[in-house]
Image (cartoon, helix red, strand yellow):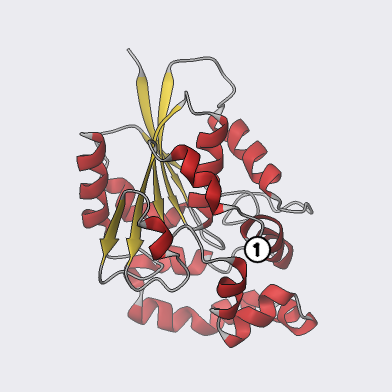
Amino acid sequence: MKKIKIVFLHGLAGSKNYFEYLEKEFSNYQTTSFDLIGFGNEAKPKIDYALSDFVQFLEKKLQLYQNDDTQYILIGHSLGALLAKELVKKYPQKIMKVFLMGYPFLDKRKFLANQSYFNGFYIKGTWWTKIICEMRMFFKALFLPLIFLFGYKYRKSYLDYFNHTYRSAYGTIQNTILKDDKNDLFELSDKIVFINGQKDENVDLEFCKKFKQYIIESMGHLFFNHEKQIAKIIKDEIKL
């Protein structure tokens, strides 16, 4: 009998805590979530944070190279969705289904144009954004009262946003996110399901119409407070 494991993969500057409440919706099933290399409490080595770095990390973490009967269902958000796509490309026999949230991103030119003033300079790697990033513990302390006042339920997730390095965030953007080719998705149409927010300005919703897609009208890029709706979609799709 095949073993089924549900795996949650978080996005840029996120952590496994982003799935704290979504994972609880699958409490009757075998699930796993963890921090990606360079983020959360995981190691932050001085590497390029290229796609190959993430894939190698995930292969080892999930032991995908083992010839056992474990089958995976991947639930990825943003960067995590991009990585889930790459895993199902490489291990189609091991992965049953992939649910992609907050992905695929807009084409590179539109994606860059759509960023805020600060994010635009951050992506370009200007010197002063590096300084601001390295001062993230100062900003964490500054925003701490606001997080506890207005975002207490998701406080772990918001606090983990500060738990990365400039190299891990900037390298991931430049060497993984901006180099992604969403056209790879066409060869995976029988394995993937999109769950996107109508208010997500970073996602190419028109592109997703070519595939099976669920739209949550009140959701933006983050999926907080929409866990029950997302879980229902997933359970209905895989008949859990």
* Direction from residue 198 to residue 189 in the image, left or right: right
Q: Would you place residue 1 above or below residue 124 in this image? A: above
Q: Is residue 8 left or right of residue 129?
A: left
Looking at the image, which residue is at 62% across and 84% down? Answer: 118
Point out residue 79 in the picture as x, y percentages from the top left corner: 53, 56
Residue in the picture at 43% in, 59% down:
207
Residue displayed at 20% across by 34% down: 239
Viewer-side residue, 215 vs 169 = 215
Position of 13 compared to 23: left or right? right
For the residue carrying disc 1, how many other residues have a C-alpha within 10 Å: few (<14), some (14-19), or many (20+)?
Answer: many
User: Is residue 137 placed above or below 23 in the rendered structure?
Assistant: below
Q: Is residue 83 left or right of residue 132?
A: left
Q: Amino acid at mark 1?
A: Ile
Q: Is residue 33 above or below residue 119?
A: above
**Residue most toward the bottom?**
117
Instruction: Please identify the quadrant where the N terminus is shown.
Output: top left
Res 168 visible: yes
Pinpoint residue 26: horizontal percent, then vertical percent.
27, 41
Q: Residue under label 1, please give it.
A: 173
Q: Nearer the viewer, residue 109 or 71?
A: 109
Q: Nearer the viewer, residue 176 or 136?
A: 176
- Where residue 218 sits in the image (x, y, percent)? 26, 72
Check the image and report above or below for 225 versus 43: below
Q: Check the picture and name the quadrant holding the C terminus.
A: top left
Residue drawn at (61%, 54%), measured in percent from left and top?
Answer: 180
Q: Residue furthest top?
A: 1
Residue 133 visible from this viewpoint: no
Q: x and y percent of residue 73 in the render?
A: 39, 35
Q: Total of numbered circles in the picture?
A: 1
Q: Quadrant of residue 7?
A: top left
Question: What secondary structure is marked by label 1?
Answer: helix
